[in-house]
Amino acid sequence: MSVGLYRYSGDIYDRDSELTLSENISTQEFYDEHWERAIHELGISIVQDSSEIVFHQLEDALDELDRLREWVIQELDGANLEYMQGRVEQLQRILPNAFESEGDVLYIF
């Protein structure tokens, strides 16, 4: 299993809705060990498993990613540092363009 960022062409619960964005965030094991710790320590509320992100939360989500990146640099090393920093930076690159309209919802699960 893994945790990812997703966007659908309509309501996620509509059988006709199509997946239009899929970005891997982390393996489940790594997420449980490292992301959850960072989220708890930093008080992250938007960029976490089971979240729905709407357009007006974009700036706050980017701020959370900045805080996560700084945490990674301070708390991790070696392969763990490289992996999580790379995933956070990838999210920082794609999130500003992930909304095709202000009505879109992004999902993390």
Image (cartoon, helix red, strand yellow):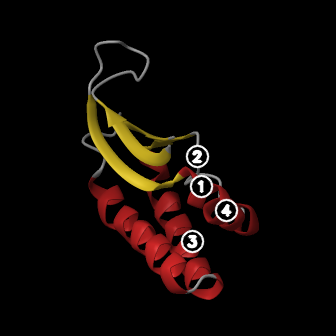
Instruction: Indicate which disc residue 68 carries.
Output: 3
Where residue 73 sits, quadrant-wise, is bottom right
Front-most of residues 57 and 86: 86
Q: Residue at x 38, y 41 (%)?
A: 6
Dot 3 or dot 4: first in sequence order is 4
Local SS, label 4: helix
* Contact check, label 3 and label 4, Cβ < 8 Å: no
| Closer mark to the observer between disc 3 and disc 4 | 4
Dot 3 or dot 1: first in sequence order is 1
Residue 54 at x, y = what percent?
45, 42
Q: In the figure, 23 relative to 107: above or below?
A: below
Local SS, label 2: loop
The span from disc 1 to disc 2 (Cα, nearest Å) is: 13 Å
Q: In the figure, 32 relative to 105: above or below?
A: below
Pointer 1 residue: 29
The span from disc 2 to disc 4 (Cα, nearest Å) is: 13 Å
The span from disc 3 to disc 4 (Cα, nearest Å) is: 14 Å
Residue 33 at x, y = what percent?
67, 62
Front-most of residues 55 and 53: 53
Q: Callout 3: few (<14), some (14-19), or many (20+) C-alpha neighbours within 10 Å? A: many
Instruction: Indicate which disc residue 33 carries.
Output: 4
Amino acid bearing label 4: Glu
Amino acid bearing label 1: Glu
The span from disc 2 to disc 3 (Cα, nearest Å) is: 14 Å
The span from disc 3 to disc 1 (Cα, nearest Å) is: 18 Å
* Contact check, label 4 and label 1, Cβ < 8 Å: yes
Residue 53 at x, y = what percent?
48, 44
Instruction: Indicate which disc residue 49 carries.
Output: 2
| Closer mark to the observer between disc 1 and disc 2 | 1
Q: Callout 2: few (<14), some (14-19), or many (20+) C-alpha neighbours within 10 Å? A: some
Q: In the figure, 96 relative to 100: above or below?
A: below
Q: Residue at x 35, y 66 (%)?
A: 90
